[in-house]
Image (cartoon, helix red, strand yellow):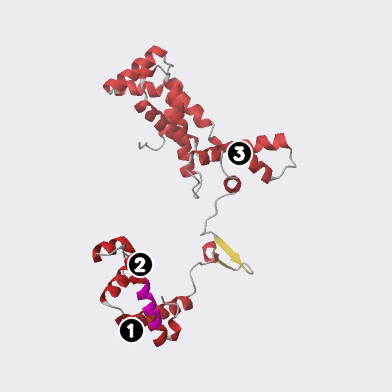
Amino acid sequence: MAQAPGIGRILAKAAMNAPFLAREEEHDLAVRWKDGADEAALHRLAQSHMRLVIAIAARFRNYGLPMQDLIQEGHVGLLEAAARFEPSREVRFSTYATWWIRASIQDYILRNWSIVRGGTSSAQKALFFNLRRLRAQLSQTMGSGVGSAAIHQHIAQAVGVSVADVAVMDARLSANDMSLNAPSFEGDGQNSSERLDHLPDAAPPPDEVVGEAIDSDRRVRWLRDVLHVLSQRELDIIRARRLDEDQATLESLGARLGISKERVRQIESRAIEKLRKALVDRHPDATALV
């Protein structure tokens, strides 16, 4: 749900003046919204629970995101809870809405906390939001001399993720994002380049690319030179199984040719042997082609 800029501040101020609802009044408002789509009832229901939104948002204020934005996202979760709430279950709306408010704020933090995206599973989310607290608790109980490996092992067991996941998340939470476009000074510091310029390229060097293209063209010509040694059925099978972009299965070829898939496999194997022999006889360097 789109929100206007600064609406979090407006919602926070309005929450201070909103009266608390009695259980009967809350239930009546929820029924009016659920059964009659009464927007006035929705507004009163949401406004009276903005204190809850602010309280939950305050728990996440240490993630470096504006408090007003957290309140705004919590309000989105509050409205989602109102849309899904079933008054007939006789549960207080605040109890039901707490989960939706917290989930909305957590999703917002995960989307905006870092340019590097973390995992989205429930276990990964739990690790993200609990790692610092668990690490601090374990450091106190296990002593300052304990290594990170032992702490990571305990956290992994508590949250239900791998030790490697804990190590990666711990490293992410302990360091800031670094732009690849940031300057990187080399040598005497007079000339600068971007960090992106120093990343290794996994692609093969140009000479290998050109060499492979030349070899590929040569092998195609060699193969065309010897295709005439095959019978028409052998040629059809080799084309369908080896040369066409969408390779056919043994079953589909057998159905098309009226033979069993085992017979197709035998013909294919025999055709490959004929091609290999013809290639070696004409081009000794072509032994690895088929």
Q: Which residue is mark 3?
A: 157
Q: Which residue is mark 2?
A: 265
Q: Looking at the image, is 100 positioned above or below residue 19?
A: below
Residue at image location 33% in from the left, 20% down from the top: 41
Mark found first going from the N terminus, 3 or 1 = 3
Q: Main secondary structure of the magenta part?
A: helix
Q: Quick one: 167 or 260, which is closer to the camera? A: 260
Under circle 3, the secondary element is helix
Q: Looking at the image, is 266 positioned above or below residue 156?
A: below
Mark found first going from the N terminus, 2 or 1 = 1
Q: Position of residue 247 (x, y in %)?
A: 32, 65
Q: Left or right? Give the position of 39 relative to 189.
A: left
Q: Left or right? Give the position of 6 relative to 135.
A: left
In the rendered structure, which segment of residues is drawn in magenta? 269-277
Q: Position of residue 48 (x, y in %)?
A: 41, 21
Structural crowding at the residue carrying mark 3, measured as other residues with C-alpha within 10 Å and reported as few (<14), some (14–19) or many (≥20) = few
Quadrant for the C terminus in the image: bottom left
Q: Position of residue 179 (x, y in %)?
A: 52, 56
Structural crowding at the residue carrying mark 2, measured as other residues with C-alpha within 10 Å and reported as few (<14), some (14–19) or many (≥20) = some
Q: Quick one: 95 or 226, which is closer to the camera? A: 226
Distance from the alpha carbon under mark 2 to that under mark 1: 24 Å
Q: Which residue is mark 1?
A: 225
Residue at image location 42% in from the left, 35% down from the top: 6
Residue 252: name its quadrant: bottom left
* Circle count: 3
Q: Looking at the image, is 163 positioned above or below residue 286?
A: above
Residue at image location 39% in from the left, 28% down from the top: 81
Q: Looking at the image, is 154 positioned above or below residue 214?
A: above
Under circle 2, the secondary element is helix
Q: Is residue 272 magenta?
A: yes
